[in-house]
Structure formats: structure tokens, C-alpha cells
Image (cartoon, rainbow, N blue to C red):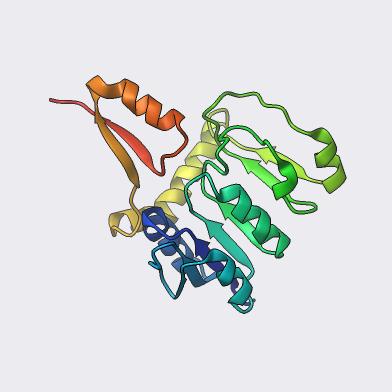
Amino acid sequence: MRPIKIAILGFGKIAADQHVPSIAGNDRLELVASSSRSGQGVVQAFTDWRQLIRSVEGLQAVAITTPPGPRYEIARECILAGLHCLLEKPPTAGLAEINDLACLAEEGRHVSIAVQRGATTEIPIFDIMRRRLTLTGSTLRPRPVEFKTMVADEISRTVWPYVEGGRLKPVIDATFPLAEADAAHARMESGGHVGKIVLTVRE
């Protein structure tokens, strides 16, 4: 089976630290191009993501790692071009809400694994029916201990070597002293962060 040709749109720190090594470690994927406004990237590097999706031969999928604001527009155009899309979280500027399901392809699938702005939202059910969409989700907390143990063992076997080798590391967006926790919360609630927000405590 030939690997899926994938490109990274919005190449930056999180793409370099997380997506590039993950793609390189998966023989089912082949990283063929990237785009960023600065031209920074790997393989074929573009400054215009539209030019990338039009010109890279055989492209099948994209990982969209831009800031949240433009992700919806990019995803919509990529889907219309027939590409599979992976969106970094939050998938759009409205983090916990599916404001517009038009960005999903016919018979598309939306998988929710976390929310940060509440557990309820309004969903346009007619769009779900008309496009034959599948909405699903998963969370680890209520699963039995046996399942969590299996997940931990699998992570230890397949992921942890990348951590120990320095190829996989957390992305830190900002660091605040504990006394500025309100500023840290404001940064998180803005939806503009990419990576972890850390509070530091003096010993």
C-alpha cells in the first residue's frame, strides 16, 4: 500500500516538534510539502497554502497547524479540493462550538476529544442529515482501569521512545508566575494560544 501524501499548512513550532516526527514515524504517511508565511518548512516549502494544494501532485491530505482564526477557511477550501483534513485544536476560533458544519465533506466525520468552553452547544441538525455526517467523541476518564492500562502500555511502547529521544516534546505557549493566574486564564480563554500554558511556583 502506498503511503498517503500529506502536507503541513501553517508550519511552525508545533508542526516541527509534533507533526513532522509523528509523520516520519508512520510508514503509512509521506510528508511532501509545507507552507508558512515566512517560507519556513520542510520538503517543498511554500509561502502560499493555496498554491501548495493546487500544485503538489498526488496530494491527499493536509494537517492544518495555523493559528485558530484562519483554520475554517483553509479547511473548507481543502475539503472542496478533495483533501482529507486534520485540524489542530481548537479546530476553529470558536473552540467548543460547531458553528458551521459546512466545512465537513459529504459523509464527513467530526471527532471531539476535548472541550474548553462548556459541555453544551447548538448543532444544525438539518446539515448533519443533509450531508450524512457522523459526529462522535471519546474521553478516557470513564473507561475501566483495564482499558487505561492497555492505553498506557501502548503509549510506553510506541510513543515514549520519542519522548526519551527528544523527538517529541510539549509545546509551551506561555509561562506565568502563580500570582498572575488570572492572566494565564485570560490567555487560555482567548483561544489564540498554541501549546501549553504553564504556571510556575517558587520553591
Residue 56 seen anywhere in this rendered image of the structure: yes
Q: Residue furthest left?
A: 203
Q: The C terminus lies in which quarter of the figure?
A: top left
Q: Is residue 200 above or below residue 39?
A: above
Q: Nearer the viewer, residue 50 or 201?
A: 50
**Quadrant in the picture for residue 202:** top left
Counting from the top left corner in percent of width and height, residue 10 is at 47, 58
Counting from the top left corner in percent of width and height, residue 87 is at 56, 50
Q: Is residue 42 left or right of 91 when viewed as pictured? A: left
Q: Is residue 7 left or right of 110 when viewed as pictured? A: left
Q: Is residue 123 above or below residue 149?
A: above
Q: Is residue 3 above or below residue 177?
A: below
Residue located at (68% from left, 44% from top):
110
Q: Nearer the viewer, residue 23 or 177?
A: 177
Residue located at (32% from left, 43% from top):
172
Residue located at (38% from left, 60% from top):
16
Counting from the top left corner in percent of width and height, residue 198 is at 30, 34
Residue located at (45% from left, 68% from top):
24
Q: Is residue 130 left or right of 145 when viewed as pictured? A: right
Counting from the top left corner in percent of width and height, residue 36 is at 44, 62
**Quadrant in the picture for residue 159:** bottom left
Residue 28 seen anywhere in this rendered image of the structure: no
Q: The N terminus lies in which quarter of the figure?
A: bottom right
Q: How many marks?
A: 0
